[in-house]
Image (spheres, rainbow, N blue to C red):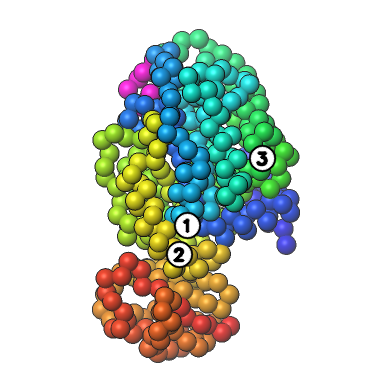
Amino acid sequence: MSFYGWGPAAGRAVRLPAAPENLRSREAFQDSRFGMFIHWGIYSMLGDGEWAMTNKNIDCREYAKLAGGFYPSKFDAKAWVQAAKDAGMKYICITSRHHDGFSMFGTRYSDYNIVEATPYGRDVVRELAKECRKQGIRLHFYYSLLDWTREDYYPLGTTGQGTGRTAHGDWNDYLGFMNNQLTELLTGYGPVGAVWFDGWWDKADADWQLDKIYATIHRLQPGCLVGNNHHREPFPGEDFQAFEQDLPGQNTAGHSAGQTISALPLETCATMNGTWGYSITDRNYKSVAALIHLLVNAAGRNANLLLNVGPQPDGEIPQASLERLREVGRWMKTYGETVYGTRAGEIAPGAWGVSTRKGDRLFVHVLRRDGDTLSLPLTGGVVRSAVRFADRAEVPFSVATDSVSLDLSGIPADEIDSVIELSVRR
């Protein structure tokens, strides 16, 4: 059965059939459920997040001097990939080029890149791609559509207006530059799991020619997925729907107002503290329990979690992030089966928690207790058994016409996630 993406284009809906390789990639993407986001660039040297250039109105010519001092002597692709694997993550998405315009790979189309503009002189994206292939991790590329440096990104968007650009270049030159870079990434770095776009919202009325960009990606690598963090319903040619700092259906961060949930695979991206790029002052890290709850809540809403780390200027992932990743990984070693390869269960999310399903196995993730009895709506199946997932101990239950009640009195109330497996015959 073919899967189609829908969205607005030239004022009308367009139906775009997906290639078989693409459909298989979508399925594998959903099965993976957990990935690592990496925001890293010369902005890390300022220790003030990835938006420092525009937030502080730094002249682009002065900002570019940061590259001359960028030497991440402790960068270790093997350590990064191993940290992701130890956390139970199945893919990595790295910023190949962020809004500051600096390319973290050796591009032929600009000398403003890590190989030519820094004393380090190494293509960290290539090294990461090689290590991901070696360790069996899918690699995704974040790619910024907007640019605070280039003069052909004109007219200027809503951000980056104070970065010192006075010349007015040709917008078509900018589009050509992006297509050339994307072609490099898709032809020179092995299999790419997805391209994750950001920045469309900076010039929402511009002629981005996304149809051509997406067609190029799908032509070069039919199995490569396309996502766009534009905070709208998916556009034609996109293969998954992104939600920033929120779970699908929520809008606590203010990015998802009016954004409906599509039938495409879903992904929530979130920071571990308060910033995407490295911040020297931000120590407001989420607890291990909060991160596990975020992952489980995403899976219970049929979404992946793309959890961010912001490496330091020296190339190391902050210790506070690594500590939390290790703890999440320990939890996943026990409970990963209730997350990987699942889809949202038929019991809708509530204040108590969420459900996930795999075949006839319905996993009830109790994240918040309010007494020793949990009654949940359940229709269309016969509950044959209920056990604690971790130790297979029986959980007393009773059923009514349209519900099941679980006796939680034998389960410690302080568990991060009390996972109960129901065997439900359809």
Q: Determine whether the residue tagged by mark 3 lies in a helix, strand or loop.
A: loop
Which circle marks residue 3 in the picture? none
Residue range corresponding to the magenta coloring:
52-59
Q: Tell me whether circle 3 and circle 2 mark residues in contact (CB < 8 Å).
A: no
Foreground pick, 6 / 52 = 52
Looking at the rendered image, the quarter that the C terminus falls into is bottom right
Q: Is residue 177 magenta?
A: no
Q: Measured from the top left, where is residue 11 in percent x and y?
A: 62, 39
Secondary structure of the residue carrying numbered label 2:
helix
Amino acid type at mark 2: Lys
Q: Sequence order check: which comes first, mark 1 or mark 2?
A: 1
Q: Residue at x 73, y 62 (%)?
A: 1
Report which residue position mark 2 lands on. 333
The tag earlier along the polypeptide, 3 or 1, is: 1
Residue to which mark 1 is pinned: 88
**Residue drawn at (39%, 52%), measured in percent from left and top?**
325
| Residue 91 seen in the current view | yes
Q: Which mark is residue 190?
A: 3
Residue 57 magenta: yes
- Please rate how many residues cluster around mark 2, counting C-alpha atoms within 10 Å: few if below 14, some from 14 to 19, many from 20: few
Q: In this view, does 320 lie to the left or right of 315?
A: left
Looking at the rendered structure, the number of numbered marks drawn on it comes to 3
Where disc 1 sits, the SS reads loop
